[in-house]
Image (cartoon, rainbow, N blue to C red):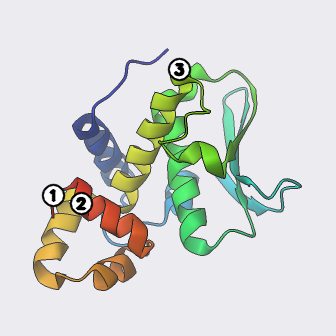
Amino acid sequence: MNEKRNRENIETIARGKLKEYGMYGVPVDPAVLANRMGINVATVIFSDNDVSGMMRKTGDTVRLYINNSDNPYRQRFTVAHELGHVVLHLNDFEEGDYPERNISMFRNNSNIDPGDRYKETEANQFAAALLMDEELVKDMWEKFKSLKSMADAFEVSKEAMAYRLGNLGL
């Protein structure tokens, strides 16, 4: 099992991936990043509409499947969240399919096994850091000072941006 990481460490890891793959900027397309990392991303129709995405690990190959019926912002966050699992936790996963239910992506869910809850929290932190880099958010906040303008620029929901701004003390 991987060691638990703090938010600052996850911010550094996410920023490092963005820079490593020439994606440091606004907005970030997490599907393009995944492709540059050698990970195929496909939108699919799941028989269970409560599944927002799925990671499939086969040998050294990882594929991400995203719910076609989710809105584009939800799809972007799901790809970024699944990339968080790949970057932070891949060695913890055996070969197989790992569906991500909408409910498991929310950190307040008490139905998630405590051993896995930190992984979901870390994947959410990674997704936020990937889509809304701390340094870029702080720089752009000084210019915009508008939740809607920030959400539009980063191509995330207003709710996601509000949470990020609050988390960064802005």
| Residue 14 position in % (x across, y down) | 34, 46
Q: 59 above or below 36?
A: above
| Residue 70 position in % (x across, y down) | 68, 68
Q: Amino acid at mark 2?
A: Gly
Mark seen at residue 115: 3
Q: Is residue 23 left or right of residue 133?
A: right
Q: How busy is the neighbourhood of tag 1: few (under 14 within 10 Å), some, or many (20 plus)?
A: few
Q: Is residue 166 left or right of residue 33?
A: left
Q: How busy is the neighbourhood of tag 3: few (under 14 within 10 Å), some, or many (20 plus)?
A: few
Q: Are marks 1 and 2 in contact (CB under 8 Å)?
A: yes
Question: Which residue: 36% across, 59% down?
Answer: 22
Q: 137 above or below 167?
A: below
Question: Which residue: 38% across, 18% down?
Answer: 3
Mark seen at residue 166: 2
Q: Amino acid at mark 1?
A: Gly
Question: Which residue: 24% across, 64% down?
Answer: 165
Q: Which label's residue is closer to the chain start, 3 or 1?
A: 3
Q: Secondary structure at mark 1?
A: loop
Please state which of residues 44 and 104 is positioned toward the viewer in this rendering. Answer: 104
| Residue 153 position in % (x across, y down) | 34, 80
